[in-house]
């Protein structure tokens, strides 16, 4: 059972920032505040929380009540994975008339200052990917050499499996034109973990969309815990191989 706390005024939503949350009580309010500081016209939020034991869902409800505009919180029962959270959030954004849809993590890894540039790319592109692997992009300077290598080569491996042109294949910070999400068919997507990002990139490429990359520096989370697991990596490897074979 999913329950939606609605606070919506359809006409005012132009840019929907979709944020999946699982135990992000500490960072979600900071993220919302920092995004608001960017003064984006027609901005609204869709938060998809999976019954976070740390109370993120209630915090999101409070933020929604205080917000002057569209702020929808979808409460789902139990952790159901990042992929299905985004699918549900994208659908709500489309149903509420959003013209541009942003996907963004709640853990402050994706700097809100990048939003303006990222959204600007949609003037000439169907999809804009905030990218660590184009000039000007990068990863947290605190990352160890080993961590950088794992991340970089994991990304190269996924690009090879899927034949992806986009340099940052696992990027979870993207902006879509409404039409782009409508044409990939949100309910066709299958992967739940971080493979979801590569699956979306693959579908966009297959559909012949114009995808551009916009540089940003990924910052390590300083609060809460990553939900990445070995199981998610294995799932991504097998499912993405299957996706490539089946098309
Ligand atoms: N609703 C929901 N959100 C999730 C789930 N798993 C991860 N997230 C959120 O997705 C975003 C990225 O997850 P994170 O653990 O930071 O992944 P990492 O950056 O790859 O380590 C964060 O905002 C998480 O709270 C899930 O099962 N359900
Ligand atoms: Mg993270």
Image (spheres, helix red, strand yellow):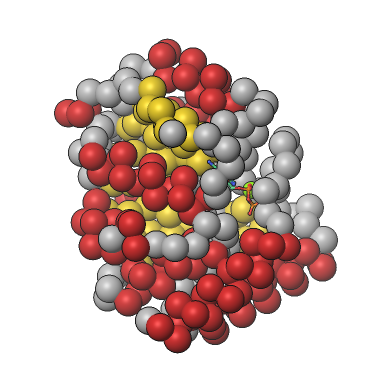
- Give the residue at x 39% y 50%: 87
Q: Which quadrant would the N terminus be assigned to in this image? A: top left
Against 5, is 17 above or below?
A: below
Residue nearest the viewer, comparing 233 with 17: 233
- Give the residue at x 62% y 53%: 218
Quadrant housing residue 246 = bottom left
Q: Which quadrant would the C terminus be assigned to in this image? A: bottom left
Against 106, is 179 above or below?
A: below
Q: In this view, does 211 lie to the left or right of 98?
A: right
Q: Where is residue 153 in the image (x, y as percent from the top left)?
A: 68, 76
- Give the residue at x 48% y 54%: 83
Residue 240 shows up from this direction = yes
Q: Is residue 165 left or right of residue 92?
A: right
Q: In this view, does 99 lie to the left or right of 73?
A: left
Q: Please, which residue is most extreme toward the left here?
A: 11
Q: Position of residue 132 (x, y in %)?
A: 57, 62
Q: In this view, does 127 lie to the left or right of 79?
A: left
Against 77, is 246 above or below?
A: below
Residue 124 shows up from this direction = no
Residue nearest the viewer, comparing 158 with 100: 158
Quadrant housing residue 7 = top left
Q: Position of residue 140 (x, y in %)?
A: 70, 53
Count all numbered tags in the image, as a single digit: 0
- Give the residue at x 30% y 40%: 93
């Amino acid at each position: 059972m999913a329950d939606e706390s609605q606070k919506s005024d359809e006409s005012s939503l132009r840019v929907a920032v979709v944020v999946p949350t699982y135990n992000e009580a500490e960072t979600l309010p900071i993220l919302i505040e920092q995004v608001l500081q960017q003064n984006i016209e027609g901005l609204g939020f869709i938060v998809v929380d999976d019954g976070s034991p740390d109370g993120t869902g209630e915090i999101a409800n409070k933020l929604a009540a205080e917000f002057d505009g569209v702020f929808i919180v979808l409460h789902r029962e139990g952790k159901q994975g990042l992929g299905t959270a985004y699918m549900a959030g994208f659908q709500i954004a489309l149903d509420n008339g959003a013209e541009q849809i942003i996907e963004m993590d709640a853990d402050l890894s994706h700097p809100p200052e990048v939003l303006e540039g990222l959204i600007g790319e949609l003037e000439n592109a169907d999809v804009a990917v905030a990218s660590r692997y184009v000039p000007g992009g990068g990863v947290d300077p605190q990352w160890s050499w080993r961590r950088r290598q794992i991340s970089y080569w994991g990304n190269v491996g996924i690009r090879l499996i899927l034949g992806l042109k986009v340099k940052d294949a696992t990027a979870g910070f993207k902006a879509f034109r409404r039409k782009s999400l409508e044409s990939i068919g949100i309910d066709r997507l299958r992967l739940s973990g971080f493979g979801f990002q590569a699956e979306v990139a693959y579908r966009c490429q297959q559909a012949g969309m114009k995808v551009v990359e916009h540089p940003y520096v990924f910052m390590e989370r300083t609060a809460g815990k990553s939900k990445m697991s070995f199981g998610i990596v294995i799932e991504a490897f097998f499912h993405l191989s299957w996706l490539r074979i089946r098309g």
